[in-house]
Image (cartoon, grey):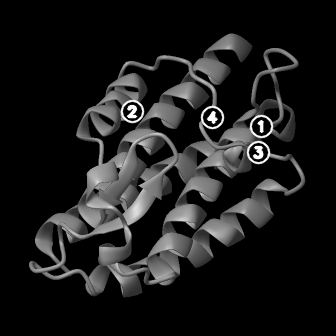
Amino acid sequence: MLTTTAEKFQSLTQKRSQLFQQLDELSGEILHFKAGPDKWSIVEVIEHLVIAEEDLLQQLSANIPASTLDPASKTPDRYRMVIKVMKQDIEVDVPDKRAEPRGRLTLEELIGKWDDIRDRLPEYLTAVTDEKKDDLVYRHPFGGPLSVIEALHFIEVHFDNHLRHIDRILARIK
């Protein structure tokens, strides 16, 4: 695994562990609290994070040749906009309705799915070599085709954005 890829994956692993420690201290009532009918609960935020990483894993495991993704459709400005919006906590609609939480799974089931994703992800990340690091392998619904390194950066910024989302939910309760 490339150093950059390994570092991103390790950072995501540490952040997820810290999140799980935080979740262990919360009651079911707090985990399912919604600040309004159109707002997500903490469990729904977790589900959204799992869906996003599941999509990444599915796209990587599909092993779609980079040559089939139109390099002209790569839109660096749109990718930068996605990252900027998430870093600044600007509330936007989910760009792909399939990534919206459905609320059908328990926190334990979501963690089990997430564990499976995280167990399988290194297999695909290990295959990324210096020669393939810039190949377009992941399609973000708004940001366009991304390389593995860009996709991992997106997943990390996305994760951080939703950690702050969880903190805002908790602040409303306390």
The CA span between labels 4 and 1 is 21 Å
Q: Which badge, 2 or 3, comes first in the chain's sequence?
A: 2
Q: CA distance from mark 2 to mark 3?
A: 20 Å
Q: Is residue 39 left or right of residue 155?
A: right
Left or right side of 96 for 39: right
Determine which residue is flagged by label 1: 31
Q: Position of residue 155 (x, y in %)?
A: 41, 51
Q: Name the quadrant of the N terminus.
A: bottom left
Residue 109: x, y in percent? 79, 65
- Disc 2 from disc 1: Cα separation: 27 Å
Query: Based on the displayed image, in which of its 4 quarters is residue 174 positioned?
Result: top right
Q: Which residue is mark 2?
A: 82
**Amino acid on which disc 1 is placed:** Leu
Between the C-alphas of marks 2 and 4, the distance is 11 Å
**Which residue bears the numbered disc 4?**
94
Q: Is residue 133 at least partly visible in the picture? A: yes
Label 4 packing within 10 angstroms: few (<14), some (14-19), many (20+): few
Residue pictured at 30% horizontal, 76% vertical: 67
Viewed as shown, does residue 22 lie left or right of 4?
right
Q: Disc 3 designates what residue?
A: 101
